Image (cartoon, coloured by chain):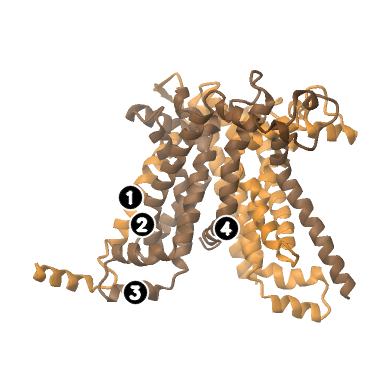
């Protein structure tokens, strides 16, 4: 019995290692490719270990062309998207969680319905709207478009969190004379900080990773975010593959590192939103 | 002054506030979503009934259902529908199936479980653009590590590589997509598994049930609603998915990876046919709606039967 259990644990750990290997290999391969010399890279046998003496490739990558500018643009767009999505998402989630009102079902349905809208479809009319309002080729336009797409997801996450707080908590405050906005910002918002953090992370990295809007709305090279810059490397011949992989890794790592750091909250918020919403 | 406060305090007593209160909280987000999602959607519905060029969008001619008729009569669109169908079905089965297995694995006891649970989410956090880039490199015809692996297995990918091979491009894109999606389903299903009462699983074991039986009788009923929900989400997200396919193959070779969304984007921006692009997009939305409504009907029917 005991040996069987021990074998089970060993077997499970092996299976987990296989899964983690599959999951991490492409990113590891990016890293290895960035740190492999031309000769080894284009020889007959793949090199599975990085040549750490070439670590300077990351500094070179950052010095390359517009890379720093791309990252800054991405950071601005992602931060803006996060602020807009949270600012609009909190009151929406509060209304859906704490009040019953005519049309509530319709609002929830509309939020779910937005999950069916492809970005590639709405890019055309948004392009026209942005051209008329001067939002085309501006980071603000990109922020507004990105936030509109991530707002429903953020709202569902926050709604799940609000639903998890017993109504007695805010009803007590209401009876003491607090107004709905006071209840929301002084009592409920502090209680759901983890979920707000989760929503913020999701909004930030949805915009950080977003490509269709960015490539369509921004035509000024100065304003390109990193997603468009990195995508531009595909099929391109002039930049060395090591530099390309280094830039791609610099673009990827913040997203992955931040998710790993915040993942407890993201998962809790995501599942609360996905399952109960 | 103090009188004013006393007056306001009396009004605040009403526990629910005015009946307009929820709408005040709702209004900003509603206005925002209407402006940036519903208005553009309505414009697309209108466009789908017109012939409109990207080069001169203000000049548009009403053509009724012509775009839809033309689409469904064309062979290329029928191929697009078939590719979309294969893409969606395989993505859902693959991501939910693998996700469930991984969730069960991560729910069992082993040292380092917390770290493993965190690390498994890597693909879901990584940007699609970077994934497309590394996938293209790993599948490079001459130097790609996966190309070498496949060749050593005796699979001939041809001189131009996997992504230029009409038989292999779609499988390659499917595997990449599933790789990116399964961590999300695994994480959601893992949290559903955690609400399965452990005493019940142990009781089933005590009664001599084998693993499969205790899964079917104890675990499955608890996680079934979550599995259904995540499958529907994966289906409608798969129909929407764009950047990975676009950056890896642009729908080629020979249309073998051209899903509805790829088709609509190239109709709009390569062929400049905004009306046709909109019609194709509407077909995608209608398919999503059918999936959602169908899933809902199946769920209610199952509930009624049990």
**Alpha carbon separation for disc pair 1 and 3:** 24 Å
Number of dots carrying numbers:
4
User: Which chain does tag 3 point to?
Assistant: A
Cβ–Cβ under 8 Å for marks 4 and 1 = no
**Alpha carbon separation for disc pair 3 and 4:** 29 Å
Cβ–Cβ under 8 Å for marks 2 and 4 = no
Q: Which residue is mark 3?
A: A171
User: Which chain does tag 1 point to?
Assistant: B
Q: Quadrant of the N terminus of chain B?
A: bottom left
Give the camera-side residue of B191 and B81: B191
Cβ–Cβ under 8 Å for marks 2 and 1 = yes
**Alpha carbon separation for disc pair 2 and 1:** 8 Å
Q: Which residue is mark 2?
A: A91
Q: Residue A267: give its label.
A: 4
Image colour assigned to chain B: orange
Task: Confirm whether circles 1 and 3 share one chain.
Answer: no
Question: What percent of the width, then of the height, locates residue B56?
Answer: 42, 19
Task: Confirm whether circles 3 and 4 share one chain.
Answer: yes
Q: Is A81 left or right of B167, judged from the image as shown? A: left
Q: Is A48 left or right of B239, judged from the image as shown? A: right
User: Which chain does tag 2 point to?
Assistant: A
Cβ–Cβ under 8 Å for marks 3 and 4 = no
Q: Which residue is mark 1?
A: B28
Q: Nearer the viewer, mark 1 or mark 3?
A: 3
B184, above or below A39, in the image? below
Q: Nearer the viewer, mark 4 or mark 1?
A: 4
Q: Earlier in the sequence, mark 3 or mark 4?
A: 3
Q: Earlier in the sequence, mark 3 or mark 2?
A: 2
Q: Quadrant of residue A222?
A: top left
Q: Secondary structure at mark 2?
A: helix
């Amino acid at each position: 019995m005991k040996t069987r259990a021990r074998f089970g644990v060993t077997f499970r750990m092996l299976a987990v290692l296989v899964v983690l290997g599959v999951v991490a290999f492409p990113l590891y391969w990016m890293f290895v490719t960035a740190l492999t010399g031309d000769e080894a890279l284009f020889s007959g046998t793949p090199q599975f270990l990085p040549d750490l003496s070439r670590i300077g490739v990351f500094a070179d990558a950052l010095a390359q062309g517009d890379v720093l500018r791309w990252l800054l643009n991405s950071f601005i767009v992602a931060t803006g998207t996060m602020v807009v999505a949270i600012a609009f998402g909190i009151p929406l989630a509060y209304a859906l969680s704490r009040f019953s009102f005519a049309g509530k079902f319709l609002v929830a349905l509309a939020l779910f319905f937005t999950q069916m809208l492809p970005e590639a479809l709405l890019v055309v009319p948004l392009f026209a709207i942005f051209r008329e309002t001067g939002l085309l080729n501006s980071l603000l336009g990109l922020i507004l478009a990105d936030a509109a797409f991530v707002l429903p997801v953020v709202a569902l996450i926050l709604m799940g969190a609000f639903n998890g707080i017993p109504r007695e908590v805010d009803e007590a405050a209401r009876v003491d004379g607090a107004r709905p906005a006071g209840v929301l910002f002084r009592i409920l918002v502090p209680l759901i900080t983890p979920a707000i953090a989760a929503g913020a992370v999701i909004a930030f990295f949805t915009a950080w990773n977003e490509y269709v809007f960015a490539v369509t709305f921004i035509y000024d090279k100065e304003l390109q975010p990193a997603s468009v810059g990195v995508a531009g490397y595909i099929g391109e011949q002039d930049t060395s593959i090591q530099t390309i992989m280094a830039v791609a890794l610099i673009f990827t790592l913040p997203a992955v590192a931040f998710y790993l750091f915040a993942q407890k909250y993201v998962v809790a918020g995501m599942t609360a939103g996905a399952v109960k919403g | 002054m103090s009188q004013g406060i006393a007056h306001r305090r009396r009004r605040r007593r009403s526990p629910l506030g005015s009946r307009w209160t929820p709408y005040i909280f709702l209004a900003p987000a509603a206005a925002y979503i209407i402006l940036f999602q519903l208005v553009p959607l309505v414009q697309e519905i209108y466009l789908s009934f017109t012939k409109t060029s990207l080069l001169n969008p203000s000049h548009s001619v009403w053509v009724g259902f012509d775009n839809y008729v033309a689409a469904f009569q064309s062979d290329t669109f029928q191929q697009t529908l078939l590719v979309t169908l294969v893409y969606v079905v395989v993505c859902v089965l693959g991501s939910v199936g693998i996700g469930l297995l991984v969730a069960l694995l991560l729910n069992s006891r082993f040292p380092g479980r917390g770290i493993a649970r965190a690390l498994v989410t890597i693909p879901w956090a990584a940007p699609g653009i970077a994934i497309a880039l590394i996938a293209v490199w790993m599948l490079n015809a001459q130097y790609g590590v996966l190309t070498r692996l496949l060749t050593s297995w005796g699979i001939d990918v041809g001189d131009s590589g996997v992504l230029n091979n009409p038989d292999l491009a779609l499988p390659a894109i499917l595997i990449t997509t599933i790789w990116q999606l399964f961590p999300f389903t695994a994480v959601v299903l893992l949290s559903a598994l955690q609400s399965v009462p452990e005493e019940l699983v142990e009781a089933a074991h005590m009664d001599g049930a084998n693993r499969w039986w205790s899964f079917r009788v104890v675990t499955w009923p608890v996680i079934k609603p979550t599995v259904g929900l995540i499958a529907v989400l994966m289906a409608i997200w798969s129909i929407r998915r764009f950047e990975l396919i676009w950056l890896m193959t642009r729908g080629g070779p020979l249309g073998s990876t051209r899903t509805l969304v790829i088709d609509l984007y190239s109709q709009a921006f390569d062929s400049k046919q905004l009306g046709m692009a909109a019609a194709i997009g509407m077909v995608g939305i209608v398919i999503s709606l059918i999936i959602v409504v169908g899933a809902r009907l199946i769920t209610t029917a199952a509930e009624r039967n049990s």
